[in-house]
Amino acid sequence: MSRRPVYSFSMSASPASVKPPEKRQETRQHLIEVGLELILLHGFNVVSVDKLVKAAGVPKGSFYHYFESKEDFGLQVVAFFQEEKCNAYEAALNQPEGTPFSRLAGLFKANNDRFVNEARFCGGCLIGNLAQEQASDYPAFQAALKGCYESWVATVEEVFRSAVLSKELPAATNTHRLTQALFIAMEGALLTAKLTRSREPLDTAWWLFFDADSPLRRDLGALSANGGVLT
């Protein structure tokens, strides 16, 4: 079975259209991929084991052969999502073209485009969705989601550090705070875009951090020109 990338904040294929696996060893992965799409579209609590196996086209016994419980299954979905997202981050940010900062801007722009054009404002970010739905009820989920977030922050902060070294950002930039602010803005923009069914919140968040004409970028440029000192 081919593995589709999940680096965007959305999933676009319909689980009902996914064919059941032909080989037994593919069943576990098939359940995880179908489960990921169902959870993105409907939420973890709504997706029962019966709904999952029906959408996946496999016997119910297959689920309990590979997963101890629904919670265990959910954690495996999170782990899969995180692995795919990290692989996609690495691929996008290590391209030879452009600067680290421009590649990061392109990555988030592509994510926004996929969410709007392919998913049509459905789905969203698995980690953000589950954080709202499950983190307070399941400590294991909270720990797993926190680990994903910290991994994303570390990856993107490294890009901002590279931007400081290449003088795209001033030496005084607090890269950790800037990275946290980026994810807070993007997750909030994603939620607002789903609510309003408009891409404007996504474009606004992207503009704030990556457009040269945004107040944030202008302030950073002035800071750099002034030797890293605000006056």
Image (cartoon, rainbow, N blue to C red):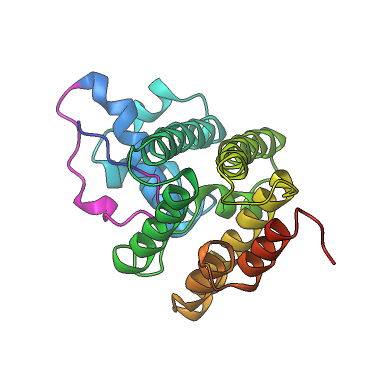
Looking at the rendering, the stretch of residues picked out in magenta corresponds to: 6-23
Q: Determine if residue 136 is in view.
A: no
Which secondary structure dominates the residues rendered in magenta? loop
Residue at image location 37% in from the left, 49% down from the top? 37
Q: In the image as oriented, which residue stretches furthest toward the front?
A: 226
Where does the N terminus fall, quadrant-wise? top left
Residue 97 image offset from top left, x and y in percent: 33, 43
Residue 58 image offset from top left, x and y in percent: 26, 35
Total residue callouts: 0
Residue at image location 32% in from the left, 42% down from the top? 5
Residue at image location 68% in from the left, 60% down from the top? 225
Query: Taking 157 as reference, is 41 left or right?
Result: left
Quarter-of-image position of residue 154: top right
Vertical comparison of 115 with 175: above or below: below
Where does the C terminus fall, quadrant-wise? bottom right
Between 155 and 2, the one nearer to me in the picture = 155
Query: Taking 177 as reference, is 2 left or right?
Result: left
Residue 93 image offset from top left, x and y in percent: 42, 40
Q: Determine if residue 103 is in view.
A: yes
| Residue 106 within the segment the image draws in magenta | no
Between 50 and 28, the one nearer to me in the picture = 28
Residue at image location 64% in from the left, 50% down from the top? 131
